[in-house]
Image (tube, rainbow, N blue to C red):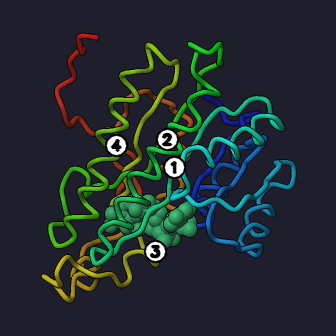
Amino acid sequence: MGLANKTIIFVAGLGCIGKDTCKALLKRNVKNLIILDRLDKPEIIDEIKKVNPKSNVTYQSYDVMAPVSESCKQLAKIFAKYKKVDVLVNGAGILDDHQIEKTIAINFTGLVNTTTAIMPFWDIRNGGPGGTVCNIGSVTGFNAIYQVPVYSASKAAVVSFTQSIAKLSKITGVKAYTVNPGITATSLVQSFNSWLDVEPCVAQKLLEHPTQTTEQCAESFAKAIERDENGALWKMDLGTLEPIKWTIHWDSHI
Ligand code: NAE
C-alpha cells in the first residue's frame, strides 16, 4: 500500500528501532502517525515531527501491560477522532531473561492484548473496514539465542500468534505479518541478562556478530509496511528485507 494518506498507530514508536521507523514512515508522507509508548520523551517526538511537518504526529502514554478493556477504551478515543486507522504496529519489547513474567507480559501478552483490543474496530463481522497488524518479532523467534530462552520463546510466540491472525483474515478482514529484525545496534542489546546467568558475557558475544543500524532496520521496516503482505514473515537483517519460508502452509479446517 502507498503510505501517503494512511493512519498508523505505532506502539513503542519512541524506542530505538521505533523512532527511526517513525521517521521512515513520515518520509513516505503518512497522514497520521499516532505513537503509543510508555516512554514520555517529548524531545524524541519533536525530532520525529521535524522529518515531515505536513504529517500529523501525536503521542499518547500507553502501557501494553494494561488490561484489554483499558486498551479498548484508549483505542475507542483514537477511532472516534481519526475515524479510520489503517495499520497497528506492535513493537514493545524487553530483553532481560532475569525477568520471566515481565518478558512474556510485554513481548507477548501485551501484543496479543493490543491486537485483541483493536479487533472490534476493524472486524468485518461487525461491519468494520478491516485493517493490518504489523508485529515486531525477531530472528530469535526462528533461531533462538539459546542463552536468552525466555526472550527467544516470547518472540517465537509472537510469530505463531501472528500467523494465526493472518489465517483468520478470511473471517475478520484483518491482515497480519511479522517483521523480524536481526541484531540491531540499540540499547536493548548493549547489556542484558542471560537466563540463570548461563552466559554472563552474552551481550558482548552477541555484538561480535555483524549488526545493522537502526536506520537500515527502519528502511526495511517501512518497506514491509508498504508491502502489506498478509502472513508474511519478514527478516530484516544487515540492511536487507527478505521473506522467510519457515513453515509449510496448509489450510486449516474451520
Ligand atoms: P528499545 O529498548 O529502544 O525499544 C523498546 C520499546 O518498547 C521502547 O519504545 C519501550 O518504551 C517499549 N516498551 C517496553 N515496555 C513497554 C510497555 N510496557 N508498554 C509500552 N511500551 C513498552 O529497543 P529496540 O531494539 O528498539 O527494540 C524494539 C523492538 O524490536 C522490541 O520488540 C525488540 O524485541 C525488537 N527487536 C530488537 C532487536 C535488536 O537487535 N535490537 C532484534 C529483534 C527484535 C534482534 C534481537 O532479538 C536481539
Residue at numbered disc 3: 186
Q: Which mark is nearer the camera, 3 or 2? A: 2
Q: Earlier in the sequence, mark 4 or mark 3?
A: 3
Q: Which is closer to the viewer, label 4 or label 1? A: 1
Residue type, numbered disc 4 = Glu
Residue at the limit of the structure toward the bottom, as seen here: 200
Side (left or right) of 148 relative to 67: left
Q: Is residue 11 above or below residue 228?
A: below
Q: Residue at x 62, y 50 (%)?
A: 10
| Left or right, 146 with reference to 130 | left
Disc 1 or disc 3, which is closer to the eye? 1
Judged from the image, the secondary structure of the residue bearing numbered disc 4 is strand
* SS state under label 3: loop
- Residue 102 location, x and y as percent? 39, 67
Residue at figure coordinates x 80%, y 54% from the top left: 52
Task: Give the left or right position of residue 223, taking residue 71 as reference.
Answer: left
Q: Are marks 1 and 3 in contact (CB under 8 Å)?
A: no
Mark 4, other Cα within 10 Å: few <14 / some 14–19 / many ≥20? some
Q: Please state which of the two labelled residues, at mark 4 or mark 2, is closer to the viewer.
A: 2
Residue 139 percent location from the top left of the image: 28, 55
Pointer 2 with pointer 1, Cβ within 8 A: yes
Label 2 secondary element: strand
How far is disc 1 from disc 3 in space, using C-alphas?
18 Å
Tell which circle, 3 or 2, labels the residue nearer the N-terminal end.
2
Q: Is mark 3 within 8 Å of ligand 1?
A: yes
Name the secondary structure under disc 1. Answer: strand
* Amino acid under disc 1: Asn
The residue at the point 29 percent across, 69 percent down is: 100
Pointer 4: what residue?
242
Residue 134 image label: 2
* Mark 2: few/some/many CA within 10 Å (<14, 14-19, 20+): many
